[in-house]
Image: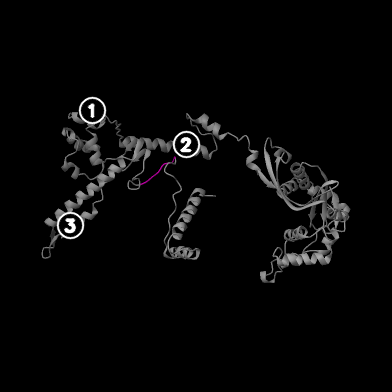
């Protein structure tokens, strides 16, 4: 699904929140749902869960504060020349928990105001605290990289700024003077004067004769690059021209003139095909009914001799309260199979005994009243009057509604499959064993009366072909599991009481 990883993470977050809620005194599903509803009414949100772990191979954009405690192989620290936010110190009055309240001196008659000593002292104190906090933030930014650190900053007047930085070349102390640190307005005002004294920062000292031997021999390694404004514009022009050429080629559906060291690798990856593509198209586990439906799509069982009843066409459906609720054909078939499974076949099966069994199934809530009303008692009794029904009653061993799983070579179902297996699952209606061997019996509730102009004799080949795949799979599974041959495969159609031996 779209955003699948995020959806999973959100569900796990909901699960964790539910567990935390259950650990409190306000427990229970009802109260938890009310808690969620109240949050929705207030417009609150639990927030989206984190779908990515810390070790994911992705590019992350975050603030320096958010990166605290994390480490990354490569880190880019951008916007180093951006000035610190000192708006709080420009207010007309200031508050401090130690120094108290300070404001300007106002002369209403002259309509002028003067800064007072308490205001100046408070401003200085607040500025020192702000710079101290920014120094700590810069320390966090500089210590996030494991392998490589990129520091990026832009200067409006590089010549003037570099000249100001070069004033610190004569300072041989490790720390910059307090005055210089206190005058900084951005991170670059600390990084530049410190880095210009390093041996690898020759690009920054091109017009200076001053040196600082104490720091030139520092073992750290830096690569300093200065990119001029004109060069950036040239790069942008080239990129824009290249993008336009690419876009024009794509619009005209012509090959793009691109040469890359990775083109052979890209071509091999894009043209690669999976050797076992069959396994990705067809399911590795299927039911017998699914296999049967697939075979029906391949073969055309629709015969012109089938008489289809014409229903009246209405422009609209009746309202639901006026529609008669009835069971589907599949639900009726399931009910018939349930009765055939529960009947005591060792005793004579009559309409009276079958009725009693149906009422018993209603009492046991195996069948509903609607399902019981759909049972054709006469059709069930009629089955036990046939030769196959009597043979089943006399069998030494009878198994009904037998589930099975069978590993079938996939090439028996799909021509293009090679070396694969498909797990076939199904339920056998009835399997009994007598002196002749195992007999597979499958009940069908298909409507056959009036559907074929030539009666059941005409329907035989069509029905036999329709269910051949299903019974063949049943037969293979039985012989493979029981290690015994199957003597007969029989279809019994309740509608009309017809027996079809396969």
Q: Is residue 355 left or right of residue 19?
A: right
The first of marks 3 and 1 along the sequence is: 3
Q: Residue at x 78, y 47 (%)?
A: 471
Neighbours of disc 2 within 10 Å: few (<14), some (14-19), many (20+):
some
Res. 357 visible in picture = yes
Disc 3 packing (10 Å; few <14; some 14–19; many ≥20): few
Mark 1 vs mark 2: in front: 1
Residue position marked by numbered label 2 in the rendering: 245
- Give the labeled residue for mark 3: 98
How far is disc 1 from disc 2 in space, using C-alphas? 49 Å
Question: Label 3's element?
Answer: loop
Is tag 1's residue or tag 2's residue first in the polypeptide sequence? 1
Tell me: residue 192, above or below residue 314. Answer: above
Write down the region rendered in magenta.
Answer: 57-62
User: Is 495 placed above or below 437 here?
Assistant: below
Q: Residue 281's spot in the image, x, y percent?
A: 64, 42
Residue marked by disc 1: 217
Instruction: State the SS at label 2.
Output: helix
Q: Earlier in the sequence, mark 2 or mark 3?
A: 3
In terms of depth relative to the viewer, which is nearer, 77 or 158? 77
Closer to the camera in the image, 161 or 462: 462
Q: Position of residue 29 (x, y in %)?
A: 50, 63
User: Mark 3 to mark 1: distance in Å?
Assistant: 45 Å
């Amino acid at each position: 699904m779209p955003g699948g990883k995020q959806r999973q993470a959100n569900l796990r977050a909901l699960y964790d929140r539910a567990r935390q809620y259950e650990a409190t005194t306000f427990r229970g599903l009802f109260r938890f749902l009310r808690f969620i509803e109240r949050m929705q009414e207030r417009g609150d949100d639990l927030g989206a869960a984190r779908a990515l772990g810390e070790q994911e191979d992705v590019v992350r954009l975050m603030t320096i504060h958010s990166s605290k405690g994390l480490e990354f192989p490569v880190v880019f620290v951008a916007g180093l020349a951006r000035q610190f936010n000192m708006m709080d110190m420009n207010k007309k009055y200031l508050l401090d928990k130690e120094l108290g309240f300070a404001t300007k001196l106002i002369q209403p008659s002259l309509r002028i105001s003067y800064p007072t000593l308490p205001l100046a002292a408070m401003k200085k104190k607040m500025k020192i605290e702000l710079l101290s906090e920014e120094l700590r933030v810069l320390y966090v930014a500089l210590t996030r990289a494991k392998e490589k650190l990129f520091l990026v900053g832009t200067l409006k007047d590089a010549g003037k700024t570099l000249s100001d930085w070069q004033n610190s070349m004569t300072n041989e102390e490790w720390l910059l003077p307090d005055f210089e640190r206190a005058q900084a307005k951005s991170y670059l005002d600390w990084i530049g004067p410190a880095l210009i004294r390093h041996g690898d920062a020759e690009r920054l000292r091109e017009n200076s004769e001053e040196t600082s031997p104490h720091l030139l021999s520092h073992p750290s390694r830096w690569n300093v690059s200065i990119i001029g404004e004109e060069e950036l514009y040239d790069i942008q022009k080239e990129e824009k021209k290249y993008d336009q050429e690419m876009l024009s080629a794509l619009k005209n559906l012509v090959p793009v003139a691109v040469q890359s060291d990775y083109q052979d690798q890209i071509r091999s990856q894009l043209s690669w095909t999976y050797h076992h593509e069959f396994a990705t198209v067809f399911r590795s586990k299927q039911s017998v009914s699914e296999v049967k439906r697939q075979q029906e799509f391949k073969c055309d069982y629709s015969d012109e001799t089938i008489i289809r009843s014409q229903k009246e066409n209405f422009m609209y459906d009746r309202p639901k309260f006026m529609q008669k609720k009835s069971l589907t054909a599949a639900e009726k078939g399931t009910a018939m199979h349930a009765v055939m499974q529960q009947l005591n076949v060792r005793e004579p099966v009559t309409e009276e005994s079958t009725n009693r069994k149906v009422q018993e199934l209603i009492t046991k809530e195996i069948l509903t009243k609607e399902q019981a009303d759909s049972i054709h008692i006469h059709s069930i009794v009629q089955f036990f009057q046939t030769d196959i029904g009597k043979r089943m009653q006399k069998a030494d061993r009878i198994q009904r509604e037998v589930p099975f799983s069978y590993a079938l070579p996939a090439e028996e179902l799909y021509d293009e499959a090679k070396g694969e297996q498909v797990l076939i699952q199904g339920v056998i209606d009835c399997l009994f064993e007598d002196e002749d061997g195992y007999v597979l019996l499958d009940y069908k509730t298909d409507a056959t009366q009036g559907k074929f102009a030539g009666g059941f004799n005409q329907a035989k080949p069509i029905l036999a072909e329709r269910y051949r795949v299903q019974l063949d799979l049943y037969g293979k599974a039985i012989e493979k599991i029981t290690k015994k041959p199957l003597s007969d495969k029989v279809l019994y159609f309740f509608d009309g009481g017809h027996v079809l031996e396969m």
